[in-house]
Image (cartoon, rainbow, N blue to C red):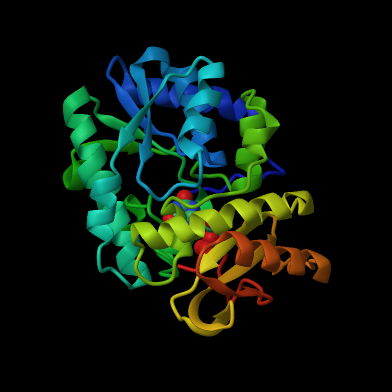
């Protein structure tokens, strides 16, 4: 049982000092690796890890081919400003090979998990001699995985999987007692700029969680283009999270007087505090129309745009 620390009872200074000491005690004079995606959780754990371990922590950005437009350059550039070197590991081929022909949501998540932890980190740990992987798992990830709702890509021990046995390294999770609101407080206290700790959450399986059906390079590219538009148009809402989802079903449309059996994008925009429950944002019809016209205009093959109005539960935040 993990003991939750709520945002109300969290004392950031105290928490940071305690976790720095824990990380130092575990790693000793060894080496650790950590994966930075640029999301709130991994950015926070990266800063915490560097405070604790300095040069004994190697930070990598795994380019899995599923990230948002320009993400690698943006994240590497930002962290360079704080004196954190980030190595980009190109694993695009490995991820797309593992995802080939995989349609089922949980099988997709499993393929991503195995590629991250067994293939990519397994190799890096061997090459670097590191014995620990530091990562930003939070309590919400654990809850949903244990409840069998969604297999979050980064949860092992609570499922009875020993990472040492399965992958050959130990996993350190300093944020696992917190939820998103608590992590934001820690990120802020560690000196992360607002553009990072206030970033909307982004899932570990990345854009593959936003493609219903097979995550091919082409379909990922479609949802990536749609994501740029949705993030730009909905930023001003200050909602908890917003996203574009590519549906699997095609619908009959028309373009230039011809039949176009095209694709559909579903837009979601969520009000939430901690991602456990969420309700759709009341967007104006004007905003919805703007979303539709830009998505149809700039994303090739899209003939239909919908807005999700169901709350979580029974919906979940990501579609996959
Ligand atoms: P769901 O879709 O389960 O999402 O309602 C709840 C929150 O978690 C994020 N999410 C993930 N985060 N690994 C993560 O680190 C994952 O596998 C994962 N799946 C979903 C999601 O974006 C939302 O903020």
**Residue 214, how many percent across, how many down?**
34, 68
**Residue 125, how many percent across, how many down?**
22, 31
Q: Quadrant of residue 274?
A: bottom right
Rendered view: 239 above or below 100:
above
Asked if residue 80 can be seen in this view, the reply is yes
**Residue 74, how many percent across, how many down?**
53, 32
| Quadrant the C terminus occupies | bottom left
- The structure residue drawn at horizontal position 45% and vertical position 61%, both measured from the top left corner, is 209
- The structure residue drawn at horizontal position 25% and vertical position 47%, both measured from the top left corner, is 93
Q: Quadrant of residue 316?
A: bottom right
Q: Quadrant of residue 187?
A: top right
Please give left or right for residue 223 compared with residue 162 in the image.
right
Rendered view: 284 above or below 191:
below
Q: Which residue is at the far front?
A: 257
Rendered view: 52 above or below 280:
above
- The structure residue drawn at horizontal position 36% and vertical position 40%, both measured from the top left corner, is 63
**Residue 288, how many percent across, how many down?**
75, 68
Q: Nearer the viewer, residue 87 or 42?
A: 87
């Amino acid at each position: 049982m993990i003991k939750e620390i709520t945002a109300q009872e969290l004392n950031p200074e105290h928490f940071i000092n305690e976790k720095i000491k824990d990380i130092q005690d575990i790693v000793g004079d060894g080496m650790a690796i950590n994966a930075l995606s640029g999301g709130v959780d991994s950015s926070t754990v990266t800063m915490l890890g560097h405070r604790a371990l300095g040069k004994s922590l190697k930070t990598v950005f795994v380019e899995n081919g599923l990230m948002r437009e320009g993400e690698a350059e943006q994240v590497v550039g930002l962290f360079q400003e704080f004196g954190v070197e980030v190595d980009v590991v190109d694993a695009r081929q490995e991820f797309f090979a593992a995802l080939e022909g995989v349609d089922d949501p949980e099988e997709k998540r499993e393929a991503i998990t195995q590629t991250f932890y067994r293939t990519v980190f397994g190799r890096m740990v061997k090459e670097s001699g590191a014995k620990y992987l530091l990562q930003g798992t939070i309590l919400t990830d654990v809850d949903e995985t244990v409840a069998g709702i969604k297999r979050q890509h980064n949860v092992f021990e609570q499922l009875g999987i020993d990472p040492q046995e399965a992958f050959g390294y130990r996993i350190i999770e300093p944020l696992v007692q917190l939820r998103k609101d608590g992590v934001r407080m820690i990120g802020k206290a560690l000196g992360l700029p607002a553009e990072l700790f206030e970033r909307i959450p982004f899932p570990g399986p990345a854009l593959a969680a936003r493609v219903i059906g097979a995550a091919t390079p082409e379909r990922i590219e479609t949802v990536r283009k749609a994501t740029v538009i949705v993030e730009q148009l909905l930023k001003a809402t200050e909602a908890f999270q917003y996203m574009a989802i590519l549906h699997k079903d095609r619908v009959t449309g028309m373009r230039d007087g011809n039949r176009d059996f095209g694709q559909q994008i579903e837009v979601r925009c969520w009000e939430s505090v901690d991602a456990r429950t969420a309700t759709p944002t009341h967007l104006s019809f004007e905003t919805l129309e703007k979303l539709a016209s830009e998505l149809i205009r700039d994303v090739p093959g899209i003939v239909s745009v919908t807005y999700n109005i169901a709350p979580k539960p029974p919906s979940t935040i990501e579609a996959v």
